[in-house]
Amino acid sequence: MAPGAAENDGRVARVVPLLRLHHLGRRQFDYAIPDGLTDAVRRGSIVTVPFGKRTVRAVVMERASAPESGDVSALKGVEAVGADVIAEELVDLAEAMAERYLCSLEACLRLVVPIGAAAGKVREASVRRDHVAVSADVDPDVVSGLTGKQRAVVDAIPAAGISKKALCDATGVGRGVLATLEKKGVIESRAGLLSGGDADEGRGSEAEGRPGGPSTPRALALWPEQARAVEDLVWALDGPGLTERLLWGVTGSGKTEVYLRVIEHALATGRGTILLVPEIALTPQTIGRVKARFGDDVGVFHSGLAQGQRLREYRRVASGAARIAVGARSAVFAPVRDLGLIIIDESHDNSYKQEEEPRYRVKTVAQMRLEAHGGLLLEGSATPAVESMTASEGRLRLSRRASGAPPAIEVVDMRRQGPGMLLASRSRQALAEVLRSGEQAIILLNRRGFAGYVHCETCGHVLMCTDCELSLTYHQGERKLLCHHCGRGYGQPHACPKCGEAPLTRASPGTERLDGELRTLVPGDQVFRLDSDVVSSAAATQAILSAFGSSHPGVLVGTQMVAKGHDFPDVTLVIVADADVGLYMPDFRAAERTFQLLTQVAGRAGRAQRPGRVLVQTSNPDVPCIRMALAGEEEAFYEQESITRERLGYPPFAELIRLVTSSPDAAKAQAAGRHLVQQLAPFFSGEELHGPAPLLRLRGRNRWQVLVAARQGERARTIIGQALAQLEEPYRRRGVVLLADVDPLSFG
Ligand code: ADP
Ligand code: ZN
């Protein structure tokens, strides 16, 4: 038999079922291919197969002439084959990602399987706090064991999720039933996420029609800096191998126009493009402009699309009818043909890291995709990550501001203010002036809710979540204390639960409190608030932004959502209410994040002909990252930060791999952490291997962390992968979960 014949003719399909069977699982299962399907089944096919008591979707990894064990005749058969086949390149990618991210192959395959293709259920929904959705992968045995009432509840949950209250009302059950289902893993609730809206496509065409707006369909005559950038990028795109570039420029410096030119060149030379944007809700203009320039050649991907729409876009891209895919993080998996260009816009944005399995980073996945056939990976940002800055082979600077002079930045030293002052008198004055002249202001306070914590004046006790070692945030609108991690709500007690005394004081004010305070200074209809408590969808975000945009005067107050790339020409004042919020986090990126946020929000002031003013309220005006952000010393900041990271062995000078062990039983979690360290110790130096160290308890699970800062990432991943493969299963049986996060962004 000729080599390779088995792949084409074999009667066995080796598949990975799309079920979460095992955290690190690579297991594949054999099924017989019935006569009628022999032509249709190949690597990348999506099939349905009988599995346990039900039928599930599965991805075919290969065909074989004989099963791993036993005889073909003993195998169950493939039941059906879907019309869509995952491109070979993407199946390879999923396999490489499972290795790279030390996670299950199934979880990685899920990313490249078109949602809604073939039979079976995959429900994906981002839901608001106090919402529930059906878990993406439910253990069939658990489902078959549900009572009739429980089943009715599950069936009543729409794909997009539903609020717990509405669900209880609709089905006539109490919250206890939901809690039981959640414990069984059948449904899940998630806290504080934005679910994508569905308004993006429509808005694109609206932007097209706006005369003189940011979306002129015809190409503009490039500014000299743009022309130089385009020339270099086109050259890089045409060259062999994978090339990386960073386009460094503030909002309005002309980055998008550069992207469009490079995409044009890619198309002209027969290569496809993926353009990634951080959050669809906050970047509708970009999508509008790409569609205005390239029309039907653009496929748009985001979580707000209905399954059918998503599949339609997938097919347009997979068939080559659309050669440009635009979307948020997961669009990096779009089946673009002859892919040659991946652009990551606002590449510093945290949304480019997935915080659930597989914990991938978009930039790394983009590198993996382009490595095979070569191409250009282009990052664009006004405030690049230190890693992008240090590692980039080619940095292209766009220094032009859309118009006008840079804003005047002033420090408001809060150490000289009376206690309890949210806005200093200078800030109030500035605000009053701006509003009097019919202009607009943005106030940033990167903390949601009314009060960040509540404490007892007598004994100092801080009210905490019982499941998480985190202080509770008071939300006045709901008259509740909420845990911002797990979303659990508590009534506000009248007296301290510890010492029985009163009063309880609400400290550390958030956006809700600021919003209320502003309404005492400014007519209420001129105040707009933007944070994840008031918006739950892209459409709602857009509604608030556009209402603010057309309100003169107007004040927009909110969390870091207000700092992203919107363009409001009449904003002449930006106030940072508390520049210190992110400063003392136990995270080596705390300085970088503070610097980025201040630089970003300052860039919102004085966009048009009017000069802008930025007031930064801080009690730490001399901390380097704040001082440098205020002085606009960007180069200096990046250089200093890079030196610090090299000295301390942080990325990009080392690759971080974070391992977390967790269990309701504190001792077991700790023992697993110790065991991991024991296994790893022979392979790493003391500088590379840290822990186990205790983390905060979350959702009732005690957690320990082992951190590897490896000089040789690939070697480290191999070693850690082997250790996990050994320990994962035995510990899981004891109720301990082992989790790996390669290139972690958060350490809480
Ligand atoms: P960024 O993506 O960096 O925010 P844009 O590409 O959106 O910058 O450009 C900012 C504004 O300047 C937009 O309104 C855009 O239409 C305009 N613009 C960009 N490049 C040019 C150019 N070469 N000539 C005229 N206007 C331009
Ligand atoms: Zn909690």
Image: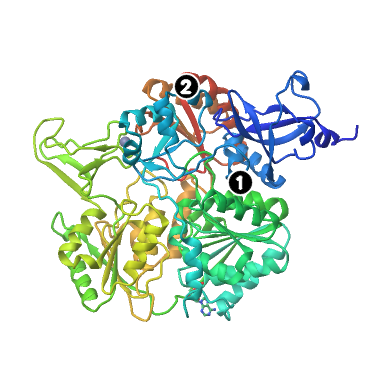
Query: Which numbered marker is on residue 260?
Result: none
How far is disc 1 from disc 2 in space, using C-alphas?
A: 30 Å
Left or right: 335, with 422 as reference point: right
Query: Which numbered marker is on residue 145?
Result: 2
The quadrant of the image that shows the N terminus is: top right
Chain-order first, disc 1 or disc 2:
1
At 72% from the left and 45% from the top, the residue drawn is 88
- What colour scheme has been applied to the protein in the rendered image? rainbow
Question: Vertically, is 582 above or below 26?
Answer: below
Label 2 CB less than 8 angstroms from ligand 2: no
Query: Which amino acid is tagged 2?
Result: Gly
Question: Vertically, is 516 above or below 678?
Answer: below
Residue 613 seen from this side: no
Left or right: 72, with 488 as reference point: right
At 59% from the left and 69% from the top, the residue drawn is 260
Q: Which residue is mark 1?
A: 114
Query: Which amino acid is tagged 1?
Result: Pro
Q: Residue 182 appears at what percent x and percent y?
A: 40, 31
Ligand 2: which quarter?
top left
Judged from the image, the secondary structure of the residue bearing numbered disc 1 is: loop
Q: Nearer the viewer, residue 77 or 212?
A: 77
Query: Which of labels 1 and 2 is toward the front?
Result: 2
Q: Nearer the viewer, residue 677 or 475?
A: 475
Q: Residue 9 appears at what percent x and percent y?
A: 83, 34
Question: Vertically, is 364 above or below 39?
Answer: below
At 15% from the left and 54% from the top, the residue drawn is 420
Q: Nearer the viewer, residue 364 or 24?
A: 24
- Quick one: label 2, few (<14), some, or many (20+) residues within 10 Å? few
Q: Quadrant of residue 394?
A: bottom right
